[in-house]
Amino acid sequence: MHVRVWAPAAREVTVVVTARGTDTAREVPLAFEEGGYFAGLVDARVGDTYRFRLDQSDRLLPDPASRFQPSGPHGPSEIIDAAAFRWTDHAWTGVRPVGQVIYELHVGTFTTAGTYATAAEQLPALAAVGITVIELMPLAEFEGRFGWGYDGVDLFAPSHLYGRPDDLRRFVDRAHGLGIGVILDVVYNHLGPVGNYLRQFSPSYFSRRYENEWGDALNFDDEDAGPVRDLFIANAAYWIDEFHVDGLRLDATQQIFDATDDHLVGAVTRAARAAAPGRSVYVVAENEPQQTRLVRPAAEGGYGVDALWNDDFHHAATVAMSGRGEAYYSDTTGSAQELIACAKYGYLFQGQHYHWQRRPRGSYGLDLPPHCFVTYLQNHDQVANSARGLRGHQLTSPAQWRAMTALWLLMPGTPMLFQGQEFSASAPFLYFADFDEALNTAVRRGRSEFLQQFPSVADFEQRGRIAEPSSPDTFRRSAIDHAERDAHAESYALHVDLLRLRREIQALQQPQRGGCDGTVLTPDALALRLFDGEPRAHRLVVTNLGSRFERPSVADPLVAPPDGLRWTLRWSSEHPAYGGGGTPDIWKAGTWCVPGRITLLFELSAGAGEPTPTVRRRTA
């Protein structure tokens, strides 16, 4: 085995190897190389474990590029042979950026067992509902018995809590066999507070130039940044190459500080693509300030990412359903006009003033195609950033939830569901993290301070109703029960049917800029017209999130059918199969009569004008 480690802070480095199944350890000195590296050949086999000793210290350290930590982040690293796995996905061509439906999944709570193996058992059901891409929350080894994964410390080691590396490979291989891509959430903006030994190898891993929200900023542009950049860029390629994942979701890219001409986001994106010759690699970024340059090509000064998370849509939709506009929801009203703007343009804030932050938010993106924006009604952050971690369907009425779900899945963009959303999972998704007592206290305090921006949460705090992040019960309560797929069959049918409709509509499968327009019918109601090729293929989506309304006419050509055709109701969110109360005649006596809390899909059929209109002639 060839060993190489960057440790410029050390004068000498040895590797301590323990043979598999024994307590016998042997120590091998490594030779110094230019640039602060130490390297050498070591007689070791797959399954053996090893650690590094720096400057004859009594403390042994895991490999910064460990492929597996069988005992967690403080234990020895295990030698893994990635080439031994027998893949069956040779015909798989990857994930293209258009026409996808994403499913965010946390391995530890996706099943009660919380393993790669049990997660793989649910893949056929995800394929059946219409999921095309799974987004795995971070897997890099982290401290504790449970956690979200955003406190990873061993970037190359998939968490031992969920199984062995080959179990993850089996999960990906099985997904590909079912036609589902897999992308991995990676955290390149900070490292976890416990189990991070990089500073012992070199203080240059971290930067003093920048303030980071979650600890020390990583050094991508200061002195000795080269090897740090190399490690993270190699990590991006590693997951694509050795685990066949189809891309990455880059966490909180606004906290990846890099003033060089080659920003790390662009560099890791290129590396990920280069690691999969012949396969399409899909890269999504989270970016709180909504900087659209991330999805622009390098020739335009961009970073080449495929898509961005769109919090603006989530906020507008949530306010529309719940009526609550606290904290970072306060700049959206949930109006019909906002929802139309999201459908047409992606971000609502593209450089104008954002009152919550007292500064401009976002950047120009009116020219971007719809697939560049990942939309969602819930994700891990937004569910957990509440008093009780409740799902969206638990915060509004069933009819309102059905109507909004239908609008969301029948509008352009790249939709993302959060685990269990397809069957209205009853389990909350709470914030959980497991550290020592002192750090648990700090985490609890930090969580409390974060939630204080929501005035309504104060009552929960005063009554001691906020879940304890370090409690095993908090973690267990967040696990979803897949038996609810049958128990909540109406919700499941809603998602299956909507995703099937989405696959049938070219304007949603291959969305183009300008392929959707909308009109406000009332402050709470809207109509979207999907321009699906030639006029005969157009669709009309009508959503009313308020009370019933009647309109004798709508003075907007977007609702007019082409000559010789008429709008015919194809689908309703109030169908009894979804738990609805049925859909009355929408054009009763020639008047638009739209019930409250409903979404309707119309397609064109032969016949003139709107169905059975009452003709009123002008009298002399």
Image: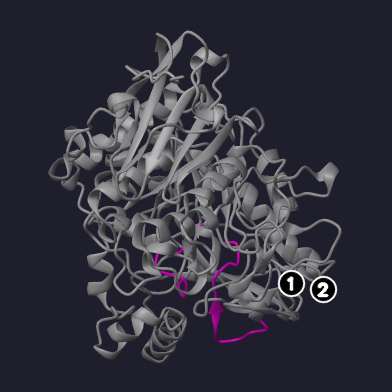
Residue 368 picture location, percent across and down: 69, 41
Residue 93 picture location, percent across and down: 56, 27
Residue sticking out furthest to the left = 487
Q: Is residue 571 left or right of residue 454?
A: left
Quarter of image, res 553: top left
* Residue type for callout 2: Asp
Where does the magenta region start and end? 54-75
Q: Which residue is depicted at the point 51% across and 53% down?
A: 313
Magenta stretch: helix, strand or loop mostly: loop
Q: Do the residues labelled 2 and 1 touch (CB within 8 Å)?
A: yes
Quarter of image, res 384: bottom left
Q: Kindly state the secondary structure of the residue where label 2 is placed.
A: loop
Judge whether residue 610 can be spotted in this image. Answer: yes
Placement of the N terminus among the 4 image quadrants:
bottom right
Residue identified by numbered label 2:
222
Q: As displayed, is residue 87 above or below residue 22?
A: above
